[in-house]
Structure formats: structure tokens, C-alpha cells
Amino acid sequence: MATTVADLLADTADRDPDGVAIVHAGARVSWSTLDARVTAFARGALARGLRRGDRIALITANRTELIVAHLGALRAGLISVPINPVLTAHELAQRTHDTSPELVICDASSEVAVREALMTNQIGTGGVVTVGSATWGDLVRPDHPAAEPGQIDSEAVGVLMFTGGIGGRPQAVMLTHRALMASVTQLAALEPAPLEPIDVLLLSLPLVHSQALGILALAFSVGATVVLERRFDPEESFTIVEREGVTAVAGSPALFTDWSMREHAGEVLGDVRLMALGQAAMPPAVAAQLLALTGLRVWEGYGMAESSGLLTCTGDRLSADASVGHPLPGVELRLVDVDGEDIDEEGDPGEIYVRSQALFSGLWPDGASAPDAQGWFATRDVAYLDEAGDLHLVDRRHDLIVVNGFPVYPHEVEVVIDSLDGVSESAVVGVEHPVTGQAVTALVVLGLESTVTPDELREHCALRLARHKCPTTIEIVDSLPHTEFGIVQRHGLHVAP
């Protein structure tokens, strides 16, 4: 019986050894070849002295090697730590400090930032392996001793996924093998089935996000071919759909927005039977345009790293605008008012509480903020249910901003802004953007006699934050509203888009 996602790959390799598992950069990898590479990585990691529970940080763009390293870590009883490769050395230092990886797998384009981050934390850089290097080749050579970790405990942590949902600062949530497998089971139970063995899936979402890893695991379980897109490129994606005979697409709002404006979209997407949205909400006008062009309703949903991916999904059925659908099979959901009482009235907003086998086990390393003794997790998101039982998000209590599908945690940006001499305090909020979904805006209060300019603030942020986190608009203001506890109150700030 499969215990880990890596076991799902092994089962599919046994059923269909010569079938195409991965298509990337013109190369096709069969199920049996992928499974062999995953085993080679697992043995190579153990041969380097890594032990069960050690962390492997994965700092690469979408590519076959990322999948090999991720599944290899799971197969070896290690912990996979996916980290966004577009982050700066400053940001990587925080994430590597928190997780203390024994091994780091990175792209050549990320290597300098990775080594700088590790040196900042006084972590040795001897454990850095760059994909494509001789060291990578040695790590995955097939003749390593057949060291095996033994039976994997389903309650052992398999993945550390960063989230800003708890406390604002990016923190690593612990996802056990049980949670990861439960997420696959819940997705597979949707009707109609999201993926089938004959499907060719274009996975445009970054694999450093839980939703993308969940969809990838579902593809492994059913034996669907996965076509990887290395970086966001709507034009190239459109070409890939036609060239590879894509039948299912998992993408961001920016991707689908671009496609909705293409005159021949209906013709090119003629063989596509499923389009699934990830990481952010779809503008209703875009969804309507795609429906008119293709006859397909985009699957939308609601989820988070703490839930190993999706909690709700619309499927392909008609639902009200801005709905994120019904709970997945196996997911329980209730809305709670400020007094902690369940809300029964249709349309009344309340905080979302969820219970699911796919939930995290708390924050790394001590399990803080885990679900309660009854298994319920308070998401800090506010929503209401309509007459059809569909969930509608009203607000995100943690003020998360989503730019092109990437999460931006306001507090993280504010810390960088406030570190510049001459800045008194700041507030970072998201504003609607027609292409990226949201854009980052910073309201900044300067100290007395400060001459800091918006351009200086932009330069300061560009050196310390990934591009999607940098404010596109910076406004110098006289003051900011505060709560009774002296905390800057983002909610209710009026910012022009």
C-alpha cells in the first residue's frame, strides 16, 4: 500500500513503465526512468550521510530534476523543503535559517544567492548541489549502495512548505505523508475526475507551491503525462498546448487572462477538457470570456499550504461569481462568529474553520498553531455561504497579497521598508490589478526632517525583495491608522488602484 507520493510513482511505473511521465525542454522521461532516477537520488542522499528527518532545500524553477529531488527526498525518509528560486539572498537566508537544510539543490541562476544566504547564517556551503553540475551527476548516479531508510511512517513529516497565513511572517508548516496522501485522495474523489490516465497536463504553476505539488501527485497517481513549463510565458504555453496535445491545464490568472485575449484561443484549446486555476482568484470577466471561447468553465478553489493544497473547488459546474465552490470530499468546513459560535444563517460572514486529514501538523519545528484537539483549524479567512452552499471569500485576516499567483506577506515587505534610515513606519496593502490580480502598494510615514524619496525606497526594496514583492506604488503619507494596541491597521486603508 502506498505511504508516500513517491510510492504512487513506483506503482504507476509498474503499471506503465514505458509511458511518458514528464515532458520538459524537449525531453521525454518515461515512468520507469523517472522512478529509477528518484531511487538513485534517494540512495545518493543517504550515501552522503543524510539521515531520516534531515531537510533538503529545493531552490529551482520547474524542471524534471526538481521532481526527482522532491520525490527522492520522500523516498529516502528525508524532508523536502521547496523554496521559491526568485527570492533574494536576504529572503533565502530567513528560510534556510528556519529550516537548517543539510542539502540544498539549486539552479545555476540561484547559486550565488543561495551561497550568500547560507554564509549569512553561518551554514557551510559544501552541501550546495547545482543542477547540471558534476556534483549533481554524482548525486544521482545509479550505482550508489542500495541503502534504504526502511518503512516510512505515515505521520512523519514529508514536506516543509512556507506560508504567511499564520502571523504574517513566512513560516514553514509541517505536512506529513498522511496529509500529502490525503490531499491526493480528496482531489481524486472529485466528480468529474480532474485527471485521467490519457490526459496530458500542462503544469504552469510553480512547483514550490502546495497546490502545484498536489496536482503533480494526482497526475502520478493516475498516470497522466505532465508537461512542465519552466517559467511563466503565456506565448510559449499556448504553443506547448498545440504541440503536445495538452488536455488539461493548471495555471495562474495571468496565464488565463492572456489566453482569453487571443483570437484563436478556441481553436488552439479545442482538445483541452479541463482548465484549473491556482494561487489566486479569476476575474469574472476573464472566466466568462474563456467560457465563450472554449465552452469550458475554469475550475476554481480555495486552499493553503496548511491544507496541503485545495480545500474547496467549483469543478466545472455553474456557480455564482467569486465563489470558490464546495468542500472537497473528506473536508469539513464551518463558519464561526466573533464569539466562537457556529453561523447558521445563509449569507452571514464568519471565520472559516476546517477539518481534514490533509491538514498540517503545526509550524516547524515545535508544532505551534496546529489544529485543535478535535482536528479543527481556524484559517483566519472570512467567508459566507450562498443559497447553493458555495463558499465566498470576504476577506483574508492575514492580509495576504497575491501577485501573479505568488504570495506576498505585507509584514515581510514592511520590515524591509522600515529598515531604511529615515522611515518611521509603513503599511503594505494589495490593490486590484487587471493582469497580475493584485499589485503591492506601500504607504510610508517618514521621520522628522527625512528626505527619503519613493525612488530611494524602490531601490532599497529591489535589493532585498523578489521582484513580485516590490511595491509598484509608494505613497508618502503623514500618518497611518492604528489599532487600540498600537498596531498599524491595514484594513480600511483607502488606496487608489
Image: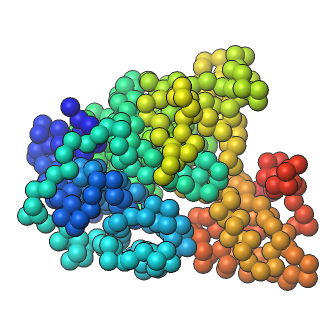
Picture coordinates of residue 350, whole percent (x, y) = 71, 29
Q: Quadrant of the N terminus?
A: top left
Picture coordinates of residue 314, whole percent (x, y) = 51, 29
In the rendered structure, the answer to whether residue 288 lies left or right of residue 350 reads left
In the rendered structure, the answer to whether residue 325 lies left or right of residue 83 reads right
Residue ID at (65%, 62%)? 412
The answer to which quarter of the image holds residue 419 is: bottom right
The foreground one among 354 and 29 is 354
Residue ID at (62%, 57%)? 169
Picture coordinates of residue 291, whole percent (x, y) = 51, 35
Number of marks in the rendered image: 0
Picture coordinates of residue 212, whole percent (x, y) = 41, 47
Residue 237, visible in the rendered structure: no
Residue 174, visible in the rendered structure: yes
The foreground one among 280 and 249 is 280
Residue ID at (36%, 38%)? 155
The foreground one among 88 and 29 is 88
In the rendered structure, the answer to whether residue 298 lies left or right of residue 150 reads right
Q: Quadrant of the C terminus?
A: bottom right
Residue ID at (90%, 63%)? 479
Which coloring applies here? rainbow
